Amino acid sequence: MLQRRNLSLISGAIVFGLVLVAIGIGPLLSPYDPLRNDLASRLMPPLSPGHVLGTDQLGRDMAVRLMVGGRISLLMSGAGVVLAMLIGVGVGLLAGFQGRWVDSVLMRIADVQLAFPFILLALTILTAVRSSIPVLILLLTLAAWVLFARTVRGSVLKEINREYVQGAVVLGASRLRIALKYVLPNLLPTIGVIATLELAALIMFEATLSFLGVGIQPPTPSWGGIMLEGQTYMRSAWWITTLPGAALFITTIGLNLISEGLRDILDPRLQR
């Protein structure tokens, strides 16, 4: 019998894997252009001939738009997680090993960011700067780096008192060597769990920005943008808003299950 932690990991991997296959291969197999209007086919409901998920207000196939929109959302969120991980882990290691005023300054910067609702900060930035994919990736990075930094910093403060670190100090190893060769490998399980959780959070954050009209701009599809376009047609064409919402739900559930399974398998110290 599968243990609960293995079941969570396998279930999440299957769900998220299916999402990746759909958004990766689906648009290549579809005969429809996600940007091409076909007013003769507008607002066709799901299971219509030739349009399994129906069409939107401009006659564009919903299935291909969902798949392309998911690809864009996932690529942007993935880039944001990678950059946030690099910055956050670097800051966390620096703060933990340097201590004193370096630790104080870096953590105060993190505290200042946490003091403001980030959605408001993002909206403020996007009112001053034209929305674009690089700008949105930067915002996603800013939204996620603090959690990596604070978690790594806290873990470093615990690890530096362990015998293997003290032994490396006695042998004359530099702080950089100790951080990268001895401490960082022990933090990888924790970092992996955080990365999976943050990927789900950034997908939702990107969708929120697009739904508010400041994220990915039309006609480029994104899950949040499709929901924004469909809110006018909620009574007559519920699927335009409901289907991208379902895609978001399924994707985040899959990632959360993976994170839970990884947490229990890779690092028992993170178990509840």
Image: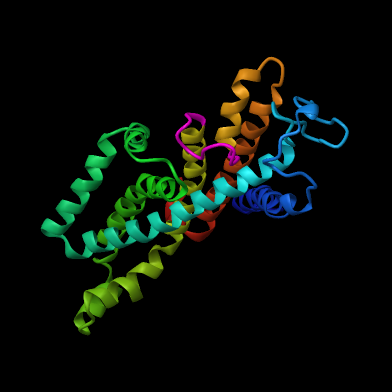
Count of labels in the image:
0
Q: Splitting the image into 4 quarters, where does residue 50 fall?
A: top right
In this orientation, which residue lies closer to the viewer: 129 or 46? 129
Where 26 falls versus 240 (above or below)?
Answer: below
Q: Position of residue 126 (x, y in %)?
A: 37, 37
Query: Does the image show residue 158?
Result: no
Q: Is residue 228 left or right of residue 120?
A: right
> What range is drawn magenta here?
211-222
**Residue sitting at the far bottom:** 171
* 43 magenta-colored: no
| Residue under the image location 67 percent in, 28 percent down | 240
Q: Position of residue 7 (x, y in %)?
A: 65, 50
Q: Chief secondary structure of the magenta span?
A: loop
Q: Position of residue 114 (x, y in %)?
A: 28, 39
* 219 magenta-colored: yes
Q: Position of residue 191 (x, y in %)?
A: 42, 58
Where 91 falls versus 210 (above or below)?
Answer: below
Q: Is residue 270 left or right of residue 35?
A: left
Coloration of the structure image: rainbow
| Residue under the image location 33 percent in, 73 percent down | 180
**Residue sitting at the far top:** 235
In this orientation, which residue lies closer to the viewer: 224 or 113? 224
Query: Does the image show residue 214?
Result: yes
Q: Is residue 59 left or right of residue 176?
A: right
| Residue under the image location 78 percent in, 48 percent down | 30
**Residue sitting at the far left:** 101
